[in-house]
Amino acid sequence: MTIRIAVIGAGLMGADHAKIVAEDMPGACLQVVCDMDATRARRIAEAHGAQDVMTDPEAAIARADVDAVIVASPDFTHAPLSLACIAAGKRVLCEKPLSQSVDECLAVMQAEQAAGARFVQLGFMRRYDEAYVQMRGALQRGDLGRALMMHNFHRNVETPAADFTGAMAITNSAPHEFDVVRHVLGCEYASIAAWQPKRSDARVAPVVMVLETADGQLVNIEVNNNAAYGYDVRAELVGEAGSIAMNPVAYTRTDMRLASSTGYDSDWRGRYAEAYRRQNRAFLRFVQTGAFPEIGADCWDGYCAAVVAQAGAKALAVGRKMPVEMIARPEFYA
Ligand code: ISE
């Protein structure tokens, strides 16, 4: 049976998900594209052969001819739309973050537990990126010995909005690292500190974070949303017996005029193209079987990222290290 998917949100990520559903998810079809802006929804629907266009997300979720949902609308809609999917008994792949509010994350977790089944997979797609898969594998096999540190760099060409702040770098961009690092290391954070260097202009400066894990590892994360030169993510996991680092991802190298060069993507869609496809196919299997994807991110992971982000934003504001205080992991998410 073909799984009929509604994509909610027809912006950058919604368009990308619609394309993935239409082209790279055998067993699924793009049923509806929904966006507040009907013209934008229609453009994406026509480009990828969707059956229908809607402007009301709750109505799209409720449709009898929609089996599953991908939420890629603005961040503040993620939790309410996930709740609507749970209420409708439909599985949802929700873009990160689940919510920037810890309380909203808890509300979605509670609704899911009350429903008695997993409905929400979160779009922390880096878990499916081969570099992080190999880092996690090396650690789990014991190749690296005990993990000591993980270094991370996350650079965007420029901020999406002129009023982007250091706090937003922590709550919007860094959650990718918060999630994938705890996924690779297999432990939770104990504290976070955050600082910013000074820039010569009014743009948001990089944010540099240092986190301690509950197992005594150190994690540093640089998020530079105005790096100017390209989309660039780097990571290195250092253990007592060795280290494993992510290679730059480039299919080609140009050798010309006595120089050798590789290019950068302008944003994350190219760098993580394969990870998005793996993640979305895992979501499809989840819809088909009901078994939550082995390495997928769930509501608990969304809650954890929100708690760390909240503590990180506070640490940046007050200029000192803050504890990361979480509830005990509910048995439901074990
Ligand atoms: C941005 O906020 C995202 O959501 C993207 O997934 C990420 O890759 C990008 O670097 C972030 O800044």
Image (cartoon, rainbow, N blue to C red):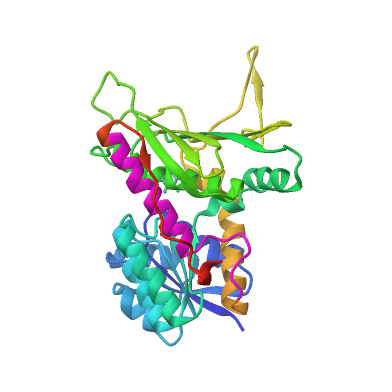
Between residues 37 and 149, which one lies in front from this camera angle? 149
Would residue 158 be counted in the magenta stretch? no
Q: Main secondary structure of the magenta part?
A: helix
Q: Is residue 78 visible?
A: no
> Is 140 situated above or below 123?
above
* Farthest bottom residue in view: 64
Q: Which residues are magenta?
A: 291-316
Q: Is residue 176 visible?
A: yes
In screen coordinates, is 290 left or right of 80? Answer: right
Q: Which residue appears at 25% of the width and 34% of the height?
A: 318
Which percent across, then down, holds residue 153? 50, 33
Which percent across, then down, holds residue 50? 46, 72
In screen coordinates, is 127 left or right of 197? Answer: right
Ligand 1 location (quadrant): top left
Would residue 314 be counted in the magenta stretch? yes
Q: Which image quarter: residue 239?
A: top right
Q: Which residue appears at 39% of the width and 51% of the height?
A: 325
In screen coordinates, is 6 left or right of 202? Answer: right
Which percent across, then down, holds residue 10? 37, 61
Which percent across, then down, holds residue 226? 37, 31
Quarter of the picture holding the C terminus: bottom right
